[in-house]
């Protein structure tokens, strides 16, 4: 099984190397975004102001990269992934379809019988070689960072709460 997976991995890398770097018409790239080399950005993807995208990244259709977000080199964002503002992805991070990185954590405080939202002003920091399964969410910290450590693998439909440290 390991030998088969090694061969398939080599084949996939060769296939990726033969795919041309292209920013498709219809992709929305903010003027202040900084783009690395050899990117593939699909139509309908959106890269916001101040975002930084490393070399050799693939950003699928419908993906949103928020203001001042940073992606390391070799990241793969499958269609409809979202990286909210100020969040950081290391190198070779894979986000499967529907992943949301950096939505508000579930923070409320009771005041006079009324629920008041606690602002979530932190971010999410994801280490190198992390893979997150489809439709999973990692909430931004209230203050500081929610952290996913290097090499962590998260399955589909997983929710990581604000201020957590995983991996």
Image (cartoon, grey):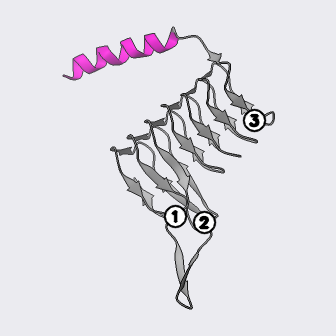
- Secondary structure at badge 3 equals loop
Main SS, magenta residues: helix
Quarter of the N terminus within the rendering: top left
User: Residue 13 magenta-drawn?
Assistant: yes
**x, y percent for residue 61:** 55, 28
Report which residue position mark 2 lands on.
120
Residue 102 on the magenta segment = no
* Part of the protein shown in magenta: 1-17
Q: Which residue is mark 3?
A: 33
Q: In the rendered image of this protein, does residue 85 appear above or below residue 110? A: above
Q: What percent of the width, then of the height, locates residue 80?
A: 51, 36
- Spot occupied by residue 128 in the image (x, y as percentages of width and height): 49, 40
Rendered residue at 53%/76% (across/down) = 108
**Reading the chain from its start, which is encountered first: label 2 or label 3?**
3
Report the residue marked by disc 1: 105
**Relative vertical location of residue 71 with respect to residue 164 in this rendering, above or below:** above
Q: Which comes sooner in the sequence, label 1 or label 2?
A: 1
- State the residue at coordinates (38%, 41%): 133
Above or below, comparing residue 37 to residue 31 in the picture: above
Q: Residues within 10 Å of mark 3 (few under 14, many from 20)?
A: some
- Left or right of 24? Residue 140 is left
Above/below status of 12 relative to 142 = above
In front here: 140 or 45? 45
Q: Badge 1: few (under 14), some or many (20 or more) residues near its Cα, within 10 Å?
A: many
Q: In the orientation shown, which residue stands out farthest toward the bottom?
A: 112
C-alpha span from label 2 to label 3: 24 Å
Q: How much space separates mark 1 and mark 3, taking CA atoms?
A: 26 Å
Question: In this rendering, which labeled residue sits more in front, label 1 or label 3?
Answer: 1
User: Measuring 55% from the left and 53% from the top, which residue is drawn there?
Assistant: 102
CB under 8 Å between discs 1 and 2: yes
Label 2 CA crowd tier, 10 Å (few <14, some 14–19, many 20+): many
């Amino acid at each position: 099984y390991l030998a088969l997976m090694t061969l398939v991995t080599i084949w996939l890398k060769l296939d990726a190397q033969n795919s041309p770097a292209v920013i498709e018409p219809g992709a929305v790239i903010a003027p202040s975004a900084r783009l690395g080399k050899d990117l593939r950005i699909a139509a309908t993807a959106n890269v916001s102001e101040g975002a930084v995208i490393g070399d050799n990244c693939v950003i699928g259709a419908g993906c949103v990269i928020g203001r001042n977000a940073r992606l390391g080199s070799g990241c793969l964002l499958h269609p409809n992934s979202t990286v909210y503002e100020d969040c950081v992805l290391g190198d070779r991070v894979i986000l499967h379809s529907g992943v949301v990185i950096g939505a508000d954590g579930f923070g409320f405080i009771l005041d006079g019988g009324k629920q008041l939202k606690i602002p979530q002003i932190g971010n999410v920091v994801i280490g190198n070689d992390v893979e997150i399964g489809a439709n999973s969410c990692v909430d931004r910290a209230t203050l500081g960072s929610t952290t996913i450590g290097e090499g962590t693998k998260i399955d589909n439909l997983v929710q990581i709460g604000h201020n957590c440290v995983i991996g």
